[in-house]
Amino acid sequence: MHSSPLAVTTSELTKSYGEGAGVFDLDIDIDQGTIVGFIGPSGSGKTTTVHLMTGVLEPDSGIVEVLGQRPIAFTSTTRARIGYMPQESILYPDLTLRENLNFAASLYGMPFRRKKALGQVIDFVQLEGAVDRLPRDASGGEKRRVMLASTLIHDPDLIFLDEPTAGIDPVLRRKFWDRFAELADAGKTLVVTTQYVGEAAYCDYVAVLAEGRILTLDTPEGLRRQAYGGPLVEMTFPSPPGSDDLISLEESVALSLDRVDRDRIRLVVEDEATAMPAIEAWAEQRRVEVEKTETYLPPFDDVFVELVSKLQNGEETDRVQ
Amino acid sequence: MSNSQGLSSRLVRVFGFIRKELASVLRQPRLLLTLVVGPFLILLIFGLGYREDPHPFRTLLVVGSEDAELAANSEDMTDAFGSGIEFVGTTTDGVQARQQMSQGDIDILIVAPEDPLQSLRAGERANFQVIHGEVDPVLRASIGLLAELSVDEVNRRVLAGVVDVAQQESEEAESGLAAVQEGASRLVTSLEEGDRAAADRELEILREQIALVQQGSSASNDLFASVAAVLGAGGAAVLGDMDGTLDQAGSDDPDTALAAAREIDASVGELETQLEAAQGLEPDLLVSPFGVDVTQINDVSSEPGVFYSPGTLVVLVQHLAVTFAALSLVRERQLGLTNVFRASPLTPGEAIAGKYLGFGSIGLVVATALTGAMLGFGIQFRGSALVYALVVVLLILSSLGLGFLLSGISETDTQAVQYSMLALLLSIFFTGFVLPLEQLAIPVQVVSYLIPATYGIHALHDVVFRGAIPDPLILGGLGLYAVAMATAAWFVVRRDVTLVRS
């Protein structure tokens, strides 16, 4: 994960609230221009991690450097390079969405002539037509979009998004992630926390948090591998295969085999590229008719459950840096 | 970032807060109405409905059956008690009178002394008994005062009766005094002619005539002597003091005798003049020779509405500023905006400057409107408009600072409103708004000077009514208060805007 300069680096970063709450011994390096997701259940330490990185909280111990500075000593210039979207939609109830956005722009010292910039960010989050409403007249999704626009209005280099998609519909969630991808393509670094495990697929790297500790940090594909031990291949048969055939298949091609239903199985293989010809050879040799063979991408919810279960049971995982 | 960019960004942030606070307040017209128009209307209705003259106490006089004269005079006497007492009648039935009182038909019972002459003869005062059932301490004090005034009035009337009798006696004495005057003249003539025997005879006759007149005019004579003594007008001739001079007039030394005789002659003439004067005076004037003229060195109206107007402005502006400031920070804290501030380049100074300027502008607009209303009510400004404006600005800054400080100890907006209401209550009772500050014990006055309105009311009374520059201690105190509160507010805002330390 060090191909480009680091946007964030932490070492043994710890912040404890007592009784086991907080974050502990956090070690992570985040490259510029990447999307890093922090995924974990409620109370796992995602927000505390973001607060430590944005300079909202002071750590108890350890080191955190953001854009080359420790948050405790952030200059105004450094702070102006950072965007922070809090977990809740925090808006002044007596100001319209546009006025809230305008206030956010002024917090970052954007010049008084910023109508164009406001227009662009409103377009970016697709909020046209709703900006002159008061928050009480806006939907949850519109409020989240204003929050995102408020985070992006000053064109920050490093963007912290604390559960940006919480409580919004799947269509809008997808749109948000499309926008995040555009920002990453433009060279921005995004640190995104989420409880939606499926959103891990949109990240370049994913840190799985539980009880204040990073259980693992990997690419989405790497996480799948960690969860199941290798890539998955799904085979469908026109008629149920025999037990001997399956034993033979497992021994010759797969690391493990799981029967999903009578005529469908999933294999964990070492490598998809070599597994596919081997499966064809096995079918020919055993004269087994196969309807379909394809790579199977399990939902991240399943991956997460599998992974957390494994990690918490103490099974070793590879940590990719 | 260059210095000019840095300054420009700072100004943008300050202006952002000003605009945000103004928009927030203007979007809440009900809040403005509640905070300004509500208390203003309450005070206006109170001012219009307040009666300077208290509601008169319904009073019944209880006299003994033989006090017919007192009963007859009582109604006339109660006229002198003023509007504080509504005399409802006289009764000889004390039991029924108490029953009427317990039923709430009357407020005060005055029970006349049973036998005043006997008490006086025994060397004791004859006391009227004033009975009431009032519980309000202010009204109780009023009853006590009315009772004192009433008894003074009764005593004055009794004394006036004595003086009236003395005046009648002095008329009788006046004819005797003419004879004394003639005798004194004859004594002088005899001594001037050296006729010692004739002089001795005249002296003897004179002694007898003086004794006769003395008996008839002693009361009025003494009264005049007392008045003269109080006034410091020495030399008033009094017959009682003439014994020594008469003895000298009988001296063997002709010069001494003649000088004494001439002195007697002059003194008697003077006494005659005094008697004439005394006879021409009203008995009431003689028993109450001193009156009082109160002169106000300015022409400020004595209308309560006028006097309370600057205080009302001060209390309302303070209440508005304290409430807005206290609510603003608490709401931001409750919304969770403090974390957004902490992650942004915002500094405590920028946030507080924006809030001071935003809410300060609203405070100034409200103060200007209330000043316009004061002028509309016909209140004349005697002092400098500039000093007035300075006091109002310092008051607003102090009050905003107090509000920010209160927000620092409030966890919810409900608490912030409660603290603001406490500040309002303190302002009404401890600042000189309703009660003079001097009526508070010194330790309690310390509390008074913890409230900006105390300085504001004092200073505006000086500027508006007296046309004077406020006491430097008051004006300086208000300035120091504003600075101290701004410093405290900076610490409160810093807590909300900067990194949370372990």
Image: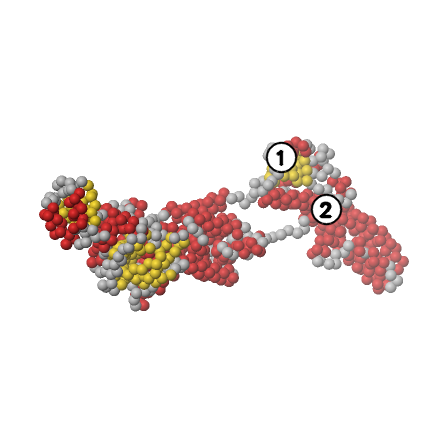
- Few, some or many C-alpha atoms within 10 Å of disc 1 (few <14, some 14-19, many ≥20)? many
Residue B208 visible, this angle: yes
The furthest residue to the right? B197
Q: Which residue is mark 2?
A: B163
What's under tag 2, amino acid-wise?
Val
Residue B26 placed where, x, y %? 35, 50
Where residue A124 appears, x then y in whole percent?
22, 53
**Residue B401's image quarter?**
bottom left
The residue mark sitting in front, 2 or 1, is 1
Q: Are marks 2 and 1 in contact (CB under 8 Å)?
A: no
Residue B341 in view (yes/no): no
Identify residue for label 1: B101
Q: Circle 2 — which element?
A: helix
In the picture, measured across the screen, residue B402 lies left or right of residue A9, that is right
Q: Measured from the top left, where is residue B110 in percent x and y?
A: 66, 38
Residue B179 vertical position relative to residue B478 in the rendered view, above or below: above
Residue drawn at x 85%, y 58% is: B247
Mark 2 closeness class: few <14, some 14–19, many ≥20 residues within 10 Å? many
Q: What whole-number distance in Å separates the C-alpha atoms at marks 2 and 1?
A: 38 Å
Is disc 2 in the same subunit as disc 1? yes
* Nearest to the observer: residue A206 or residue B249: A206
Identified by mark 1, the residue type is Met
Residue depicted at 52% across the width and 62% down the height: B473
Q: Position of residue A206 (x, y in %)?
A: 26, 55
Image quarter of the N terminus of chain A? bottom left
Quarter of the figure with the C terminus of chain A = bottom left
Q: Tell me what residue is drawn at x 85 percent, y 51 percent.
A: B208
